[in-house]
Structure formats: structure tokens, C-alpha cells
Amino acid sequence: TVVDFAKHAMLFDAGEGAQLALGRCLFSCNISSIFITHLHGDHVLGLPGLLSHLAHAASGRKALPKPVEVFGPRGIKRLIRSVLHLTFSGYSCAPFVVHELMNVPEPPELRIRVPTFGVPKVPNESEGRHIFPSSNSTYHILSTDELDVYAAPMRHSVPCVGYVVVEKERPGVLKMGNVLPVVLR
């Protein structure tokens, strides 16, 4: 799902069809943020290809205005780095930065834990943040002049978060010339 708001095109999850679907969109190379809910393949396996696609889509310009920000549960950074290293795509992908949401609850029946060993950064990657939950277990992960993005844990078979985009209040402009004729009818 893509939310295009003001200067921010935000993609929520990047399954295998993300690159193809966005290839048909005019704003695909304007994606500023990608939000991953959980690490099941149908939500993340399109991400490495999408980062390469964004680099090629922007090749007519000098460069992307700033790195694409990727947000997701712990393990997303390792997944992206591993795939980009193993496919030799680290130099050909768009600049990106990964921010990991830490301490996302794991279901008690989950027997496999995400290993903590590191994978080296790739060339086009900037260092991201570890984002920890607040006292009410929510994550305030992004704030701009126009909006805030929050995440909260969701029940699923793996660590998972849901995202909420909150538009900040802004003064409106009422054009009385347009409204008055309708009101006076």
C-alpha cells in the first residue's frame, strides 16, 4: 500500500510484486519511507529489488534527494544487507537507511529467535537508529512538519507491528466566495 501525502510517498510492506506495481506509478521514485510490518516473505522479499528499482528510476536525475528510510522490526537490517551482499547489488541500489524497532514482542510459541550476529553495511547504506517503545508500548518513529507515524505491536505468528499515520493540525482557509452561494441556496 502506498500513501502519498504532501512531499512524502510512504510504502507499507514490500512483497514480491512491489517493484512491478510501483514501476507503473509516476511517484515510485519519490518514495521517502518504507514501513515493514513483519518479516514474512510476502511482506519483505520485494524490498531489495525495489531499492535497485528506485536507483534506476532516479538515474535520470543526479541522485535521490535523500536516502530512502526503511522501518521495521529487528532483523530487517540484517535481511536487507544479506540479500544485497549475496546478490552483489549493494552498489546498484538506491541510498537507504534502516531503522529497527526493538523489543517488538515475540509470540511465546515462536521457537526460532532472530540471531543477533551482524552483517556488514552495504555501500549505499547510511547508519540507522534503534527505536525503542515508549512506556505505553508504542513507537513514535517518524515526525515531519505535516505528519507523525506511530507503530504498535500486533498479534501475529512472528514479531509484528501495525502503523498509524497522523496528520498534524494545520489552519484551513475558507473561501467565502465559494461557500456563500451554496449556503444561501
Image: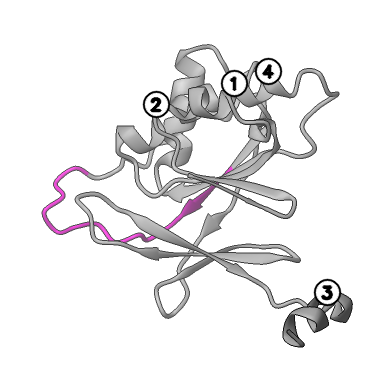
Left or right: 148 as drawn, with respect to 179: left
Q: CA distance from mark 1 to mark 3?
A: 47 Å
Rendered image: mark on residue 170: none
User: Split into 4 quadrants, where in the image is the C terminus?
Assistant: bottom right
N-terminal-most mark, 2 or 1:
2
Specify the segment rendered in magenta: 98-112
N-terminal-most mark, 2 or 4:
2
> Residue at the location (67% across, 73% down)?
168
Mark 4 touches mark 1? (CB < 8 Å): yes
Rendered image: mark on residue 52: 1
Where residue 90 sits, quadrant-wise, is top right
Rendered image: mark on residue 16: 2
Mark 2 touches mark 3? (CB < 8 Å): no
> Residue at the location (67% across, 35% down)?
27
Q: CA distance from mark 2 to mark 1?
A: 13 Å
Mark 1 touches mark 3? (CB < 8 Å): no
Mark 2 touches mark 1? (CB < 8 Å): no
Kind of residue sitting beneath label 4 = His
Within-10-Å neighbours for mark 4: few <14, some 14–19, many 20+: some
